[in-house]
Image (tube, helix red, strand yellow):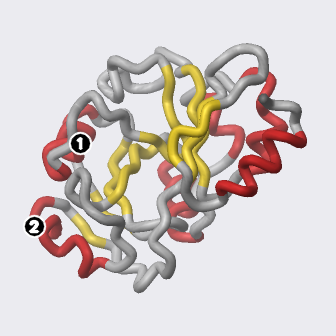
Amino acid sequence: GGVVAIPTDTIYGLCCLAEDSRAVARIYQIKGRDFSKPLAVCVGALEDFTKCVKVGRCGDLISDLLPGGITVVLPRSTPDINPDLNPSCGTLGVRIPDHPFVLDLCRRVGRPIALTSANKSNTGNTVQVEDFRELWGEVDLVVDGGHLGESRASTVFSLAEEDRRHTIIRVGRDHEKVLQALERHGYK
């Protein structure tokens, strides 16, 4: 199971095929991450969302927000997604990064890619490959996309509740854009 460090539209990430249980476990091992903390996935297009989650009535909202520095948490569309990926969660965070390399990678692979920050758990965000040098020997490939600029992870929000309610899980990049879109689409 291959694990690759890649540049994204927010920070550097560690990724693997979401369907590869060994690679998913390696990401947790490399990061020293608690297995109860879920991983998000990224896809290359809006139509790929349904391979991972139940979009329901929020398709218009999602198309307004993505691609971008946003992770949307929705109910899983099991059994389409690997049951070893976040097995204790009935939901899954999905994003479409606004970065040409990641979008091209997702489109070429054509399957969901598990993605999390390229760092040890509970340490700072990484905006250049030098920031996570201690992980280089543990991953299969490091893609150097240069300095990424501002160190800001994606805004994560959940639409998994009924009655058009949302929950902001993490404030990050594009937070204001999320709040404005939620209001425009009638979410509480």
Q: How far apart are marks 2 and 1 (CA)?
A: 15 Å
Report x, y in % for residue 184.
89, 42
Q: Point out which mark residue 122 bears.
A: none
Near mark 1 (Cα within 10 A), the count class, few <14, some 14-19 or many ≥20, is some
The quarter holding residue 37 reads top left
Near mark 2 (Cα within 10 A), the count class, few <14, some 14-19 or many ≥20, is few
- Disc with the residue nearer the chain's start (2 vs 1): 1
Identify the image quadrant of the N terminus. Answer: top left
Identify the image quadrant of the C terminus. Answer: top right
What residue lies at 33% left-to-right and 48% top-to-bottom?
16
The answer, for residue 95, to whether it is visible in the render is no
In this rendering, the count of numbered labels is: 2
What residue lies at 75% left-to-right and 21% top-to-bottom?
56
Q: Point out which mark residue 23 bears.
A: 1
Observer-nearest of 58 and 165: 165
Report x, y in % for residue 74.
59, 27
The quarter holding residue 134 reads bottom left
* Residue furthest bottom as drawn: 146
What residue lies at 52% left-to-right and 39% top-to-bottom?
169
The amino acid at mark 1 is Ala
What residue lies at 23% left-to-right and 31% top-to-bottom?
35
The amino acid at mark 2 is Gly
Q: Against 53, is 140 above or below?
A: below
Q: Is 81 situated left or right of 143 in this image?
A: right
Q: Is 165 situated left or right of 70 in this image?
A: right
Judging by the rendered image, the residue that carries numbered circle 2 is 137
